[in-house]
Image: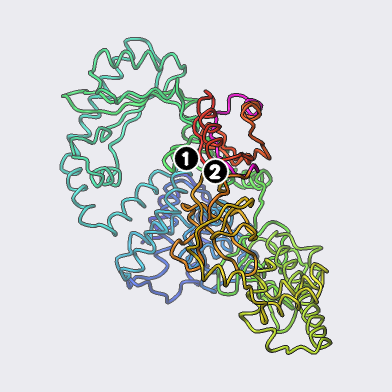
């Protein structure tokens, strides 16, 4: 009975010859699905018949309907590619093969959060768009009967449908399928909410339709009176659309676009004429008028939008645009899907190009011309990626001309490094074999095997190249480390030193700090590259294990509170002026700053400003320090300035510094903040008072916004 209903639908637009061809597909379908039942306990073949009926309602051609009847044959392993090709030709065989690949995507979708990539893979695998149409119809029929599955499975299918298949259906222009998919997803995810909206619409359905008819007739009368040529369409907002607005917090009477009409004209000026006529007769709702003709959206979308109180005081949304604007809005980069998905529309993506071309399928008047259309389509669409399957059905996206080596490294570095062979579609191939879209690749690895430098000549992905180079760089690095270590140990042996005492962990760590190396491997590499000699490292290690007693430091530690005496040194440390001192480069103190000293191990005293964040005043190695008032030296410090970008003002800063006897060592650009440049000035000053005066004079310059140490 199901099949006879399908034949009845097809007879409205197909010839007897076409129907005989459909019977051939049906005979094969009977064999494929023989004795099979669905979870609903119905004969399995009813499902592909219903899929075909959905497509028949779109008046799809013989090949599409026939393939819909046997679409799960290859997936279920009930028929081979070669058998389909022999009976129905290469086109049908490829369609079924593509559907089989699409059926394996579920695993990939559940493992990935990248919806855009997954949607791109779906379209990429559908080289012949018939497979995409069949997949959409298949999904629609499955959703109609999905209640028999467990909750987790239902939610997985809804998630995939909403994120992938509904946007594609919308872009293809199959409004009927798209709307029903939306409603079915809602019905199965929030049945209570769905029924609440549906009951409300059904309750008011006759009233709403009557209001639309009245409003349409009034607009027709208005426009005809002014001899304007136009087309007009109307609609009640979908259950899903109303549900989304109610969920967002709107009340039923706040849904202004519940009833909508669209007017299409030939000329732009007619759009403005019509909006004027409508507003002169019907009161517009404030702030609901949008002029996207004079101010197009970033994605080129153009239209006039207004919301009015129409017949019987009912709210209607009206869109007015030219046929050309409508074409761009529906088919071009400014499609309804594009701006709903919030893409920037600056460049039409490959997905958009493919789907725009696919959409013309349902606009072809002569359905028997589809074969020529597909040939042209495949010639015109360039493809930059291919999709390769693992034996488990996962999909890996690779560039055209990629090899099994690229595939291996895309999965994991270790698989690439130990790769020894590859089977493509069950046949052994060389590692430089060019993979084809849809290939199933089974990789063979062997522990202990290494990559070959020759692979760099044929791999296509940057990832593979990088990992191969990284492997050999590491190998050379390991060899360099081993060589350096052998040289160091040999020298220790020559000098008859105790290796265990000299190479203790704490001793090595102190040596690393002194030589500013990251780790022991760096020291070994430094020996190999002649950055260090083994004797320099050994002498440092000896100094650390047998340090010379610093009597001065001991003395300082015992006499922290000695009153300073007046000598000729720059800085007085606990009464001494002949102590080695170093100025902290972080805080850069100058005479006039309150300072303290930090007793280092073997490098004298490091001088900090008292407020330096790098000094702990409670540390036992902190000692009193003060400036010798007799010193005439200048000291290096730094300041940070923030100035506008209007002109080059550095010469003004240098001139001011010269006038105030400030030595400028360097001016370094440190970045930008909004419309300002940030500079660090390294300067030499006599004391804090001189520096403060210089900073004040800088602050008074109009182009400088801030100055700080």
Which residue is the site of mark 2?
352
Q: Is residue 264 visible to the viewer in this orientation of the structure? A: yes
* Residue 504 spot, x, y in % from top left: 65, 84
Q: Is residue 542 left or right of residue 266?
A: right
Q: Residues within 10 Å of mark 1 (few under 14, many from 20)?
A: many
* Residue 24 spot, x, y in % from top left: 54, 62
Q: Is residue 183 left or right of residue 637?
A: left
- Name the quadrant containing residue 316: top left
Q: Which residues are magenta?
A: 632-652
Give the camera-side residue of 556 and 674. Answer: 556
* Residue 306 spot, x, y in % from top left: 31, 24
Cα separation between marks 2 and 1: 9 Å
* Residue 693 spot, x, y in % from top left: 53, 32
The answer to if 64 sits in the magenta stretch is no
Which residue is the site of mark 1?
338
At 39% from the left edge and 22% from the top edge, which residue is drawn? 291
CB contact under 8 Å: marks 2 and 1: yes
The answer to if 637 sits in the magenta stretch is yes
Q: Is residue 624 left or right of residue 39?
A: right
Disc 1 secondary structure class? helix
């Amino acid at each position: 009975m199901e099949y006879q209903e399908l034949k009845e639908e097809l007879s409205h637009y197909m010839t007897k010859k076409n129907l005989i061809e459909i019977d051939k597909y049906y005979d094969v379908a009977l064999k494929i699905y023989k004795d099979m039942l669905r979870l609903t306990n119905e004969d399995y073949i009813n499902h592909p018949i219903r899929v075909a009926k959905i497509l028949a309602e779109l008046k799809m051609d013989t090949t599409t309907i026939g393939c819909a009847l046997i679409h799960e044959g290859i997936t279920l392993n009930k028929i081979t590619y070669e058998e389909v090709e022999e009976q129905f030709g290469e086109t049908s065989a490829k369609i079924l093969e593509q559907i089989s690949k699409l059926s394996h995507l579920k695993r990939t979708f559940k493992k990935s959060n990248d919806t855009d990539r997954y949607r791109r893979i779906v379209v990429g695998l559908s080289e012949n768009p018939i497979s995409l149409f069949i997949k959409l119809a298949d999904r629609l029929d499955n959703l109609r009967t999905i209640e028999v599955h467990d909750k987790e499975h239902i939610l997985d299918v809804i998630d995939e449908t909403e994120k992938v298949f509904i946007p594609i259906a919308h872009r293809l222009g199959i409004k009927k399928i798209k709307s029903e998919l939306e409603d079915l997803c809602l019905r199965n995810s929030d049945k209570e909410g769905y029924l609440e909206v549906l009951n409300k619409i059904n309750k008011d359905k006759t009233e709403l339709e009557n209001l639309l008819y009245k409003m349409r007739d009034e607009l027709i009368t208005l426009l005809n009176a002014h001899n304007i040529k136009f087309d007009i369409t109307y609609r009640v907002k979908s259950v899903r659309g109303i549900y989304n607005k109610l969920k967002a917090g709107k009340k039923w009477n706040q849904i202004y676009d519940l009833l909508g009409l669209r007017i299409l004209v030939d000329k732009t000026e007619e759009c403005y004429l019509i909006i004027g006529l409508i507003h002169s007769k019907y009161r517009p709702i404030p702030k609901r008028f949008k002029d996207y003709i004079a101010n197009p959206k970033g994605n080129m979308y153009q239209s006039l939008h207004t919301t009015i109180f129409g017949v019987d005081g009912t709210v209607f949304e009206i869109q007015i645009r030219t046929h050309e604007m409508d074409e761009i809005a529906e088919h071009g980069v400014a499609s309804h899907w594009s701006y709903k998905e919030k893409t920037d529309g600056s460049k039409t993506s490959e997905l958009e190009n493919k789907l725009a071309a696919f959409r013309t399928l349902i606009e072809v008047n002569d359905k028997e011309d589809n074969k020529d259309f597909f040939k042209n389509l495949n010639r015109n669409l360039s493809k930059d990626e291919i999709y390769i399957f693992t034996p488990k059905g996962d999909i890996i996206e690779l560039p055209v001309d990629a090899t099994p080596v690229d595939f291996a490294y895309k999965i994991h570095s270790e698989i690439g490094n130990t790769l020894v062979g590859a089977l493509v579609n069950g046949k052994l191939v060389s590692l430089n074999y060019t993979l084809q879209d849809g290939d199933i690749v089974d990789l063979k690895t062997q522990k202990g095997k290494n990559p070959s430098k020759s692979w760099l000549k044929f791999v296509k992905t940057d990832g593979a190249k990088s990992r191969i180079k990284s492997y050999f760089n590491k190998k050379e690095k390991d060899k360099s480390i081993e060589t350096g270590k052998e040289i160091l140990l040999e020298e220790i042996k020559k000098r008859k030193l105790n290796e265990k005492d000299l190479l203790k962990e704490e001793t090595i760590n102190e040596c690393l700090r002194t030589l500013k190396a990251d780790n022991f491997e760096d020291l070994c590499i430094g020996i190999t590259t002649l950055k260090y000699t083994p004797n320099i490292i050994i002498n440092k290690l000896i100094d650390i294990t047998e340090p010379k007693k610093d009597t001065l430091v001991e003395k300082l530690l015992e006499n922290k509170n000695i009153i300073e005496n007046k000598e000729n040194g720059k800085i007085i440390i606990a009464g001494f002026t002949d102590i080695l001192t170093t100025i902290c480069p972080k805080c850069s103190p100058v005479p006039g700053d309150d300072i303290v000293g930090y007793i280092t191990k073997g490098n004298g005293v490091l001088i900090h400003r008292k407020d330096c964040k790098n000094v702990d005043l409670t540390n036992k190695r902190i000692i009193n320090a003060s400036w010798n008032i007799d010193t005439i030296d200048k000291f290096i410090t730094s300041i940070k300035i923030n100035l506008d970008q209007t002109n080059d003002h550095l010469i003004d800063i240098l001139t001011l510094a010269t006038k105030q006897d400030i030595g400028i060592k360097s001016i370094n650009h440190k970045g930008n903040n909004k419309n300002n440049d940030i500079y660090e000035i390294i300067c030499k000053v006599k004391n804090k008072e001189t520096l403060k005066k210089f900073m004040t004079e800088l602050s008074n310059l109009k182009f400088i916004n801030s100055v700080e140490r």
